[in-house]
Image: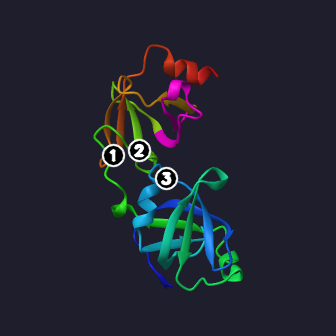
Amino acid sequence: MTTHQAPRVTVARIVRPHGCRGEVACQILTDFPDHLKRFRVVQLWDRTAEPLEARVRSCWLSRGRGGQAIFHFEGSDSIQEAERLVGLDVQIPLADRLELPSGTYYVTDLIGCEVHHRDGACLGAVADVQSSGEAVAGTPILVVDSPTGELLIPLAQEICIEIDVAGRKIRVEPPEGLLDLNRNS
């Protein structure tokens, strides 16, 4: 394993050893789990130090425990070696993500974007995106940190009228009263 510093994104988190040959079971943190099987090299990161490059011997998807990715890394040949990997994030370079269809975005690309009202006023920056499980009617919600507090803005085409991830800017046209509703809650 060697050190690697390219911009990257977490796609899985190692949760436990799997079997007795050094494999690990991972919580899947991507909407494209089948994509995990194609990687031969990933980075393992403990959220503090520099990530370590790890060669993937194999990866397969398990339906058990709600669906997990099972990785077997070079240099991990026992339960004890697999236990040392528990808690690490499995990451890939940003450049290796799947290309999304037009009008869809990775959450990591939206976080940090400035949100501007149609009149040009800056409302704040995206701090998080609540997924459909937490959102109303399946529409993701932008959680915007603003000087007056948290704003919740539906990520709908009718409201988010322009999204420029390269320019780190989102222009919104919220319905009458939406911003006031957020500030009063």
Crowding near the residue tagged with mark 2, few <14, some 14–19, many ≥20 C-alpha atoms within 10 Å: many
Between marks 2 and 3 in the image, the one whose residue lies nearer the viewer: 3
Q: Secondary structure at mark 3?
A: loop
Q: CA distance from mark 3 to mark 1?
A: 19 Å
Q: Which quadrant holds the C terminus?
A: top right
Q: Are marks 1 and 2 in contact (CB under 8 Å)?
A: yes
x%, y% of residue 91? 49, 66
Ranked by sequence position, the earlier of labels 1 and 2 is 2
Say which of 86 and 113 sits in front. 86
Q: Over which residues does the magenta segment extend?
A: 125-148
Viewer can see residue 7? no
Amino acid type, label 1: Val
Labels in figure, total: 3
Residue at 49% of width from left, 14% of height from top? 177
Between marks 3 and 1 in the image, the one whose residue lies nearer the viewer: 3
Residue at 51% of width from left, 60% of height from top? 10
Amino acid type, label 3: Thr
Up/down of 149 relative to 81, above or below: above
Ranked by sequence position, the earlier of labels 2 and 3 is 3
Name the residue that disc number 1 marks.
Answer: 165
Say which of 13 and 157 sits in front. 13
Say which of 81 and 57 sits in front. 57
Name the residue that disc number 3 marks.
Answer: 30
Q: In the rendering, which numbered label is found on residue 113?
A: 2
Whether 166 is among the magenta residues is no
Ranked by sequence position, the earlier of labels 3 and 1 is 3
Q: Is residue 139 left or right of residue 87?
A: left
Q: Secondary structure at mark 1?
A: loop
